[in-house]
Amino acid sequence: MTHGGAGLSILLCDDERIVAFAGKAMLEAAGYTVEIAGSGEQALKMLADAHQAGRPKPALILMDIDLGPGMDGTQAAEQIVAGYEIPVVFLSSHTEPEIVEKTEGITSYGYVVKHSGETVLLASIRMAFRLFEARQRQERAEERLREQNRYLELYRTTVDGMTDHKIAVVDSQYRYRVASRQFAESYLKQESEIVGGTIADLTGAEVFETKIRPNIDRGLAGVPTEFEDWFEFPGLGWRHMRVRYYPLPGFDLGDHAVAVVIQDTTEHIRAEQSARTAERNLELIFDSVPAAIWFADREGHYVRVNRAWSDSVGVEPDDATGKTAADVFDTDMARQLDREEREIVRTGTAIRGHVTAYSTLSGEEGWSRTDRLPTTDESGNIIGVVGFAVDITAERKAIRELEEARVRASAILAAHPDIVFVTDRDGLILEYHTRATDLLASTDLIGRSAAEELPEETGVRILQAIRQAYDTGRLQVVDYELDVPAGHRHFEDRLVRLDDGRVLGIVRDITVRRNAELEARRLIAEKENLLREVQHRIKNTMNTMGAMLSLHADAVQDSPAAKAALTDARSRFRSMEVLYDQLHRSESHDRGSLKKYLSQVVHTVVALFPAGSRVTVSEQLDDLVLPTSILSPVGMIVTELVTNAMKYAFAGDSSDVGDEARLSVSSCVSGTRVRITVADNGPGVQSCTAGDIREGFGRRMIRALTEQLDGTVEIATDAGTSVSVEFSVPAT
């Protein structure tokens, strides 16, 4: 362990001598010189004796709180702290918050719980020494600061009131040491509120870091520095300031200090900015107004033109200087302009609102409305002409196009088979157009309510839809029936708000479409009924065929093979009969439930055999809706597997499984894969492999149907027989 005592003396105050001697040994091993006091009174006496004898006082005191009879450690510490500059660290077994808090009110050099260990105690002692040294340095710095402030007082009284400049002194820690009256008033503060604080405290951290610090650091480095910027002052608002930093090497203010001289240049800057802004605004207006503006001298030479003139004529502003109308317009136009402007110069009479057609040298033609006035010098002498021209070519084209659009719209509305109308929010008809007058109960509709022209219930619906379209801006559609001169008709109203807040409505006669829809629904219903009837008849036919097979099977008692074949055929018919029965009872004629179908097939086939009553059937079926193209082969496969189980595992004379005959059927659906398993606990198929399924008609049929499903077959013969068929179904 590294010790850091370096011969420093410690007074250990503890009434338990053994504990004290153990602590003394540990501290001395760490390099400290240790004395022991058994009570607070003894500790105070030892300090007093050392002071009177001129001996060095301890560098630190470790003070126990419980010191037996007499004063306790906190009382002794209060007197030590009051009379001596010695750090006190409490060493105690107490951990109660109120006791710890009480010690913090006496001294803040540390509190160590006994038995915390040597490492904790030594670290606390070192921390107390560092804290004590830091406080001593702070006290020395404060004393030096007080001395420095005495030097600065003379400077403050000298500059305060001498000038309108705002003056301050800042040290190397960016703290204000002097602030003039004008400086303090800018921030609505007294000098005492500023001195001692930092620049960041006064201006804010962001302003200090971005505007002030890069400049004042040069001043603190001994370089006179000046800069200008905008600052916000609580007492002045936003002001433009010229800030100068002058190094003050003659003042004892640490390493460096600067005098801060701030001059308010706001009015000067604003005057300059106002002049520049006015000039920019004039230029902006001159080049941004949509009117072409030009200045010409008495001889008709262009002195200045704006961007609108340049764009309309096709000559850049700089290139136009010195040119005449003859240089940019055709001959006739140039002569007319020259004649008119010479007359303005001669008479001083302005020409206003003059509309003329023009043609430039590039061949562009258009219309303009011009105002031209004489310009004068300071003495009132006419020196030229200023002209303003607004190109109205687009306006005249728009008027012409609007008229053409109106004619086209009128033609379209006249030929439109629907009723088109416009209303306000309350349904008042403002205009309407239609050529199908036989669809209107009345043709006198302008100024009347759309709702009042209809039966009450229909009128209320239409009015609600008009207001909904007006308020929301969304399309509203209303269907209704109405008796009109053309007969009983079905109508569809489509309502939408126009840009000007009115509502546009289009009424379409949908009688033919509605009748076609009704006829289509009737035909579909008829088709569905016919299909169900066909399914029902097929089911009955299969039932009849199954019954016939049962009669034949009963009639060939002397031929077991024939009877078995007829029974197999009967079970196959039963699987198809179950499928058609499910389709007949469901809403769909081409799809069915796998779970429901397999359950019915299994129980139906089992019931066909004499041993069926003693077979326990268990089902674990995941459901999936499948088309009949898949359900049919699946049903025939399961029928064949259940039939085989009943014939061979649970034959009437078989006693291998006794009363525990069990047949299980499962379907597992995972994504698009389906796995169906039929298993029994019968004696099993001897020496049966996957290839054996090719033998016999039933097994050939299973193989063929599995291939039809593009699936696979697995056979297991442990503890009975288990056959699994796995295949994929189309993703839905």
Image (tube, helix red, strand yellow):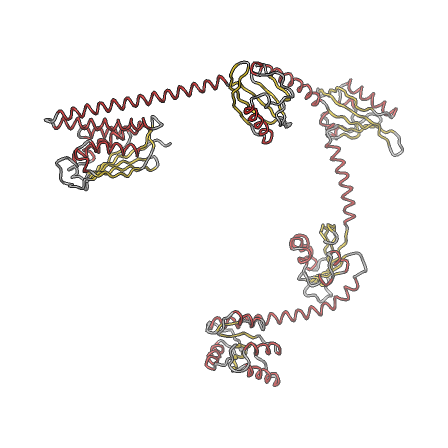
Q: Quadrant of residue 450?
A: top right
- Tell me where residue 142 appears, x and y as whole percent: 67, 69
- Tell me where residue 173 appears, x and y as whole percent: 66, 62
Furthest toward the front, the residue is: 456
Viewer can see residue 275: yes
Q: Nearer the viewer, residue 143 or 253?
A: 143
Left or right, 724 with reference to 308? left
Query: How many callouts does the rendering have?
Result: 0
Q: Quadrant of residue 55?
A: bottom right
Viewer can see residue 1: no
Q: Is residue 544 above or below residue 10?
A: above
- Tell me where residue 57 appears, x and y as whole percent: 58, 80
Q: Nearer the viewer, residue 630 or 130?
A: 630
Q: Is residue 725 above or below residue 261?
A: above
Left or right, 161 with reference to 730? right
Furthest toward the left, the residue is: 558
Left or right, 208 with reference to 59? right
Q: Residue at x 28, y 39 (%)?
A: 620
